Amino acid sequence: MRIATANETYLADEALLRTRTQWAWLGLFALVLVAAPFVLNNYWLYLACLVAINVASATGLNILTGYTGLVSLGQGAFMAVGAYTVAWLSQKTGMPFLVNILAGGLVAAFVGILVGIPSLRVKGLYLAIATIGASIILQFVFLNWSSVTGGARGLAVRPANFFGTSLTTYFQLYWAFVPITVLMVVGAANLFRTRIGRAFIAIRDRDISAEVLGIPLLRYKLMSFAVSSFYAGVAGGMWAYFFRAVGPESFTIVESIFFLAAIIVGGMGSILGGIVGATFMTLVPEILRFGVELASPYVSNAGALLSPIRTIAFGALIMLFLVFEPQGIAEIIQRVRRFFHLWPFKT
Amino acid sequence: MKSGITKRIFMALAASSALFAAQPAFAQGDDEIVIGGSIPLTGVFAFAGVAIEAGIQDYLKIVNEEGGIDGRQVRLAYEDTGYQVDQSVAVFNKLTSQNPNIRLYYGDSTGFSRTINPELERRGDIMMAGASFATEINDPENFSNQFIAGPDYTEMYSILLEYIAQETPGAKLVFVNSDTEFGRDPIESSTARAQELGLEVVEQIITPPGAVDVSTEVLKLRRAQPDYTIFHGYVLAPLPEFMTQAKQLGLETKFMGTFWSMDSSLWADVGDAADGFMGVMPYRYYYDEEEAPMLERIRQMRPDYQATGYMQGFLTAMLMTESVKRTLEAGEELTADNMKKALNSIEDFDTGGIVGVPISVPGNTVPVGRIYQYDAAEQRMEAVSDWINVQE
Amino acid sequence: MSDFLFFLEVSLAGLGSGALLSLTALAFVLIYKATRVINLAVSEILMMGGYFFFALAAGMSLSPWVALPLAIAGGGLIGAIVERGVIRRMLGESAISVFMVTVGLGSVLVGLVEFVWGTNPRTLPDFTGTAPVFIGQLYISRKIAIAFVVASLVIAIFLLLFRYWRGGVALRATATDQAAAYSCGINVPGVFSAAWIIGCATAAGAGILLGAIGGISPVMGAFGLSALVVVIVGGLDSVMGALVAGLLIGLVEAWAGTYLGGEYKLVSTFIILIVMLMVRPYGLFGTTEIERL
């Protein structure tokens, strides 16, 4: 049962976290994040880092698709831009990794603005297809601009340099990635308390009304693309330090579909949705891996069935969520919350 | 409401601790030696992965039956990767977390070999080989903990080119490569090599990945009128269509490929169009009739034809276990450096006929190979050259 | 051989593979016209067509001429199941949601193929013959020539059907205004189903032709990406557009591949796509109805 939500100031009303329960949950979550690297083994740490990277990128896409209503299948390509930038900078300069990652984000944001230009002309499906086109053109650039991108071979990435120490183990990288991702997610959550974020939402809900309200569509749509690709670029930068090799085959259209699927499954237009969706979609293949392992004594050749099962599960999750739970996991969480808020009145 | 909050916190704590409780605990013998493997049992490279796994397992069985290495059993711990780099890395992390005894590793792609290399250098306790023959890996300086159980792609081209230079001096060549990392690997180095051997590369055709319709490429080929056409970066498609159309046009050119296109069961479905396809093969075929005790043994263990990947896996396992054996004999610890040193000490080593000549591992590769040609009537690859060594 | 002859031959080859693109694009167009859904799973249904044919002709060793219509019908069956089972439920949802459903469907189909047939590439039993085709001095690959003839015939039949056949007119009426069509007594849900069945059957047919040329594998759906360019350039709801743009894109691919290099094939067509979206988003022949901003 939830009572006493009356606020005395506007500030309190606008606050991100309004109840003590929320604070408690958040504190607990923070505790788990801090404790996790001391408990997890290398494999789960690896997955935790991957989740952090994917959450950052999915949150970015959520800003563009979930909040501004512009569908993009180019998130993977923007990540690639960030990854290549970081790889290049790590080879050519000795700058600290935070600077490189920031640069990766900025370059990706710039490319994002370029790719966003068709959004002036088209929207919806046509825009989605335009972003597919843009990814393919970027892919071509990565493959053929050999002097910068290393061509088909790609680039090797020097280990992340943090005040003289190189971050190489997953334990070290976890401490680098998780704070960055937390910062970005909090930033995104706060974005929608500002004029810019609310303008995005207005554009999503009805672009013409938004324009009438005095929101310049051109500027805000491009801004949304820029912010979203900045997130992708930073995520790509982390990815580069994570895998330490970037090539033209690292980010394909499948990657872009993955992120769109992640926010669909998690819940579009919800920060929590981006986090949960990216986490869920990253971990599902691994959960299936354990499922197949359990089944292997009973099914012959179970190992070879894993990958088809994963492909099917990936597609089926997208379909099932769209058909039965279009608001995603975030909506399920809300439903659970509502249950507790209304308990014991509603039984 | 206070108690409600604490109760909720407690529940959340319980839930989250359950999440981390799933720590795998595996009990194993301490003296076991484990070969880890990121192996593609599915995906575009599945045909090779399945065979590779069988090859490694069979050789380990032979080793273990003879008492293992210095009394220690060898085991392969592997998982499917679907031929995706991120999955290969995930499998690597999972296996190395679960099996602290992994000293050797089998990787499935160039992308993986490159991606995992910094981690291998950092760990320093694992020596790796894999399904990639990328020229890049043949670099003992930067890829100090890896090796290739055969010639790299550039060396494969060298073997082909030496054969061509012998058969048809001054021949005209066309390189056909897929627009992938795999396909583009040896183009530059091999164009230079061809010139050294007095051969002329008259045209380079790049095909988009996954291309099926090659009619424009065939027209280019007709215009170039080469004596030899060398494919690289493909497994099968679109080679059959290329060869069919070239035959329709009456082209005289001979078609050649590199190791991964050389499996005879792949070509069996293609039929007559496949007749005369040549390529470089670093190992013997399952059905080769020349004297080879190890092939005999394989045929006893497996009555059916085993693909080329099988031989690759078999030889890889052989070189790996031989390195471990030599390291242990020298009384040294099983670090990557020591195992690599032991590997490089392998000279004029008898493989029991898996390779037709005694082999050495001077650097990161075994630079020998032989030209085989497909006979569609027999559904077999027949040797058309001697073993060619391109060691510098 | 003179450069001009070479150019002509390259162009012919381009037209031939363009016809195959047209046929695939036709599947997109039929479905979009009736239901306003961009069905990205067309690429995977194309692949299913190839595998059905493979299963019937190679697996059960039926004659190719029996297997051919059965495989095409199999494609239609998938269309019917998907339309009734999933797409109908999504009626009224945003176009993007439905689009993503088809993306998910594509992934499921690829997984199923890998599950049932494995991931190794396969070769289809030959049913096209091998004797080369020459027009005067000009050579065309036989399979490409067959693809061209089949695609042009099919598209011609569809154009005629839309003009004269009741069902075709019903589809056009539905495309123009669903409510008006419904009040005129047209069975609009029936038209939806029919469009999906025919569209998917067409895709399956294209898949068999494609498989005959290059073999089949779970990744052959990548071909659909070029077909997507074709439908955008031609206009999402125009059968004529699919034909013209298919041939056009085929030519561009052939020229780019020959004179620039194979790596330029895909990128050149996608540059055309972006330019087209900027200049004329509804395509060459499509209905002008895009909301402009």
Image: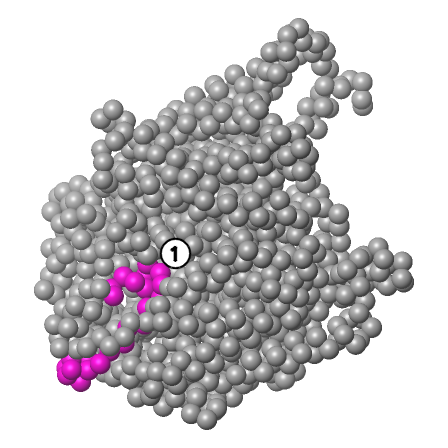
Q: Is residue B226 above or below residue A130?
A: below
Q: Is residue C49 above or below residue A165?
A: below
Q: Residue at x 14, y 42 (%)?
A: B332
Question: Residue B99 in the image: x percent, y percent?
Answer: 35, 41
Question: Residue B156 in the image: x percent, y percent?
Answer: 22, 68
Q: State yes or no: residue C219 in magenta.
A: no
- Residue type at the position of mark 1: Phe
Please indicate, yes or no, whether residue B252 appears anywhere in the rendered image: yes
On the picture, is A28 further left or further right than A316? left
Q: Is residue C29 above or below residue C205?
A: above
| Quarter occupied by residue C238 | bottom right
Q: Please state which of residues B384 and A218 is positioned toward the viewer in this rendering.
A: A218
Question: Residue A318 in the image: x percent, y percent?
Answer: 61, 46
On the picture, is A8 further left or further right than C211? right
Total residue callouts: 1
The N terminus of chain B: image quadrant: top right
The C terminus of chain B: image quadrant: bottom left
Q: Please state which of residues C207 and B66 is positioned toward the viewer in this rendering.
A: C207
Q: Residue at x 39, y 64 (%)?
A: C264
Q: Residue at x 80, y 57 (%)?
A: C177
Q: Which residue is mark 1?
A: A140
On the picture, is A168 further left or further right than C145? left
Q: Give the magenta range.
A: B164-187
